[in-house]
Image (spheres, helix red, strand yellow):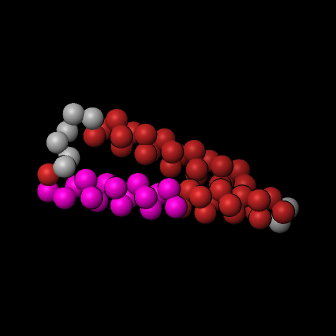
Amino acid sequence: MSKAVDRTVEELDAAMRELRRSLHGIPYRTGGFKNTHDNLARDVAVLTVHLDSARGALRAQK
């Protein structure tokens, strides 16, 4: 199970990097998109921390 958590964290990290690259050169501050992006980034960071914290508990279940 912890391998699935590791893979999920890696995929989330890769997706957020791709989002950052995708936003380069786009005027994303218009239309409230920046606020939405910032909220998403914050929520993904919280999720990643929770998944990372759960990794130890999942290893103990083996």
At 84% from the left and 63% from the top, the residue drawn is 60
Res 1 seen here: no
* Front one among 48 and 3: 48
Quadrant of res 16: top left
Q: Is residue 30 left or right of residue 18?
A: left
- Which residue is at the far left? 31
The location of residue 59, given as percent across then percent down, is 80, 58
Quadrant of res 49: bottom right
Q: Is residue 9 left or right of residue 24?
A: right
> Is 40 within the magenta?
yes
Quadrant of res 57: bottom right
At 57% from the left and 44% from the top, the residue drawn is 10
**Magenta region, main secondary structure:** helix
At 27% from the left and 58% from the top, the residue drawn is 35
Q: What is the magenta range?
A: 31-46
> Is 34 within the magenta?
yes
The location of residue 5, given as percent across then percent down, is 65, 55
Q: Where 18 sits versus 47, above or below? A: above
Image quadrant containing the N terminus = bottom right
Image quadrant containing the C terminus = bottom right
The location of residue 12, given as percent across then percent down, is 50, 49
The location of residue 25, given as percent across then percent down, is 21, 33
Q: Is residue 22 left or right of residue 12?
A: left
